[in-house]
């Protein structure tokens, strides 16, 4: 039981930062679909909750810490703004597990001034969708020659 708990907590910790770690490592650990979904969603949602409430503070203090004069509109920020204008909260939430990180997507939504409850709901639905999809298809994804070569 302790080995299982350590494995679960290790995967959970990685899911705080990278969503795809849950399905990949959960599959490697021999977890079933619901265990993969549980560890992945719980890891992502922990980040979302933390950064929803700390997002403004983090944004203000991160700018002070880095003090690097960067362009306000880089290629990345332009892409995020395009998604925002076209799809709103749901577009950012939908892309967060796949393209952005849980922290990145939450900070983006927080910086747009979105209500915390709306962020939490959108991110929960998105993480449930992607965790289930990846959990169901991880075996098939790892049969792709490029990914299979990386995995073995």
Image (spheres, grey):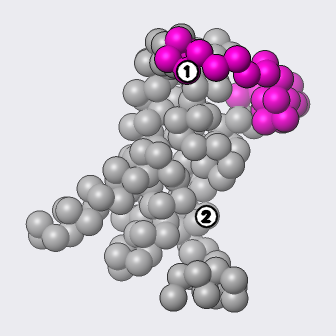
Near mark 1 (Cα within 10 A), the count class, few <14, some 14-19 or many ≥20, is few
Magenta residue check for 67: yes
Locate residue 131, reporting x and y percent: 54, 58
Q: Please state which of residues 88 and 145 is positioned toward the viewer in this rendering.
A: 145
Quarter that holds the N terminus = bottom left
**What residue is drawn where x is 43% and y is 36%?**
47
Q: Please state which of residues 64 and 94 is positioned toward the viewer in this rendering.
A: 64
Residue holding disc 1: 66
Residue 31, compared with residue 73, is above or below; it is below
Locate residue 129, reporting x and y percent: 60, 53
Q: What is the CA distance from the residue labelled 2 to the residue labelled 1? A: 37 Å
Residue 27, compared with residue 118, is above or below; it is below
Q: Main secondary structure of the magenta part?
A: helix
Q: What range is drawn magenta here?
A: 63-89
Residue holding disc 2: 133
Near mark 2 (Cα within 10 A), the count class, few <14, some 14-19 or many ≥20, is some
> What secondary structure is marked by label 1?
helix
**What residue is drawn where x is 71% and y is 35%?**
92
> What secondary structure is marked by label 2?
helix
Rendering quarter of residue 32? bottom left
Residue 49 seen: yes
Residue 6 relative to residue 104: left or right:
left
**What residue is drawn where x is 46% and y is 26%?**
51
**What residue is drawn where x is 64% and y is 80%?**
147
């Amino acid at each position: 039981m302790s080995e299982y708990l350590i494995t679960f907590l290790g995967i959970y910790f990685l899911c705080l930062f990278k969503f795809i770690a849950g399905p990949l490592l959960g599959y490697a650990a021999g977890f079933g679909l619901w265990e993969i979904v549980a560890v992945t969603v719980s890891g992502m949602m922990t980040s979302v909750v933390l950064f929803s409430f700390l997002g403004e503070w983090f944004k203000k203090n991160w700018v002070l810490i880095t003090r690097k004069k960067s362009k306000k509109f880089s290629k990345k920020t332009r892409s995020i703004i395009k998604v925002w204008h076209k799809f709103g909260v749901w577009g950012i939430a939908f892309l967060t597990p796949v393209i952005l990180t849980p922290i990145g997507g939450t900070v983006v939504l927080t910086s747009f001034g979105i209500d915390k409850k709306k962020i939490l709901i959108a991110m929960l639905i998105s993480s449930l969708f992607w965790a289930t999809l990846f959990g169901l298809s991880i075996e098939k994804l790892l049969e792709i020659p490029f990914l299979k070569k990386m995995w073995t």
